Image (cartoon, rainbow, N blue to C red):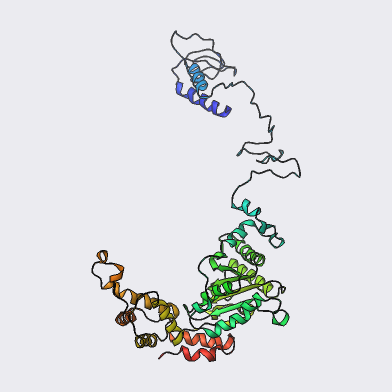
Amino acid sequence: MLSLSFQIINQQLRRGGGNASGPAYGGRGQGGQGRGGVSAFGRGRGRGRYDEPDNSFDAPPGSSNAHSNLMKEIGSSVPNYNLGATPQTNNANQGARKALGTRRTPGTKFVPPFPRSGEGGQLSRPPSGGPTSAMEDDPIMQDERLRNIEPKMVELIMNEIMDHGAPIDWDDIAGLEFAKATVKEMVVWPMLRPDLFHGLLGPPKGLLLFGPPGTGKTLIGKCIAVKSKATFFSISSSSLTSKWVGEGEKMVRALFAVARVHQPSVIFIDEIDSLLTQRSDGEHEASRRIKTEFLVQLDGATSGSDDDRLLVVGATNRPQEIDEAARRRLVKKLYIPLPDAPARRQIVLNLLGRQGHALSGDEIELVVSRSQGYSGADMSHLCKEAALGPIRCISDLSSISADQVRPIQYVDFDKAFRQVRASVSQKDLEGYIKWNTQFGSSGIGEQDESTLSRD
């Protein structure tokens, strides 16, 4: 406040000009002509001692000088402020606070912006009251396995738990009988009966599902969680990455810690090749650290105790890009091929059962034969395109009821085949077969290779 007042005084003195009347420092005079030194409104001609201002001059009646105007302005802007008074400090703090932004000399002691509490010399900060404070009161946070995990990380991982949606049954997955039987044997049964599957019968904790896109790999992962009554974590590479250095490794560590608390747990990582690609010399350091931490945690899950019922399921369309260390830790590698003819028939019948159709058995078989090489997602798009055929024939949708829409016919599928093509090439299929023969589970390639070739 003192510096502000001095600035106001200087501004007012400068505005007064050299022709105004006012006191002189070092003598009396008008307009800065007095002897003795510097005038308030101009520089004097004579030399003199630097004296205090003298306000004893006589002003004409009704007139005002710069000094009186300045005092009035200060009194209106700063009420009850005395320039000659000593600044008072707050007795509650008594020097515990220091004005922020002021310069501290080397000999002075640092004063923190927070008052210290009486015990332990800890800074007493106000409670945040945010989600982190609520997580700290959660009984889950009291678990010993989450002792070194930040509550913020636990909250982010808890948001990735999928406990919603309709339950999925094995019959909802068309075809893939060998893959479903293998998953039941190595995953579901050991999680339901851990007392029987221990020692050499202990299940592997890593499973890799690879194959063309749209073949049901994600559905298998969800069905595993439903049938094993496990907590399902749906994780992607974006869930474990952060712009802050070191946050990605903490997220990976928190993921496995929370999964062990909520076991039996299934950690499903879609497009795992984007997270565990092969390490190279030109790779970014942050990405390498995340991979290293994930491999360490994954190896710990694999070599953990028999009481830990934790399964890591990875799905990928490019298994050849996965790192060798991750491939070793994902013990079981199941190839999920394109649906064969019975599976495509089941997909068509399930989808057409929700809509009215007029297709005969022979026409359905014709649709199945023409869709050779289509994935499950391609079959779904084909049926949706055919279902739009009756709607396109209607000229005025606003005046027609739902009962007046004709059923789906084969001519609609004939037009849909011109719009929807197979999304997987023969070259890609040959690459999957080659990788499965080299690294995949035995017997799958020989069993399903005949279903992959196109007419």
Counting from the top left corner in percent of width and height, residue 24 is at 53, 16
State the quadrant of the C terminus. bottom left
Q: Is residue 8 left or right of residue 94?
A: left
**Residue 318, percent from left and from top:** 52, 79
In the displayed structure, 83 sits above or below 344; it is: above
Quarter of the picture containing the N terminus is: top right
User: How far across and how far down the image is residue 191, in percent?
Assistant: 65, 75
Residue 19 place in picture, x, y as percent: 43, 17
State the image quarter where residue 244 is shown.
bottom right
Would you say 381 lies left or right of 116 here?
left
358 on left or right of 137: left
Q: Nearer the viewer, residue 381 or 358?
A: 358
Frontmost residue, 318 versus 449: 449
Q: Identify which residue, 364 or 50, lies in the foreground.
A: 364
Q: Residue 371 occupies which quadrant of the picture?
A: bottom left
Q: Is residue 127 above or below residue 227?
A: above
Task: Give the total number of marks visible in the rendering.
Answer: 0
Residue extending farthest front: 403
Is residue 288 something one can see in this rendering? yes
Q: Examine the rendering and report whether any part of residue 282 can be seen.
A: no
Residue sitting at x 62%, y 60%? 154
Q: Is residue 185 above or below residue 121?
A: below
Q: Report which quarter residue 414 is drawn in.
A: bottom left
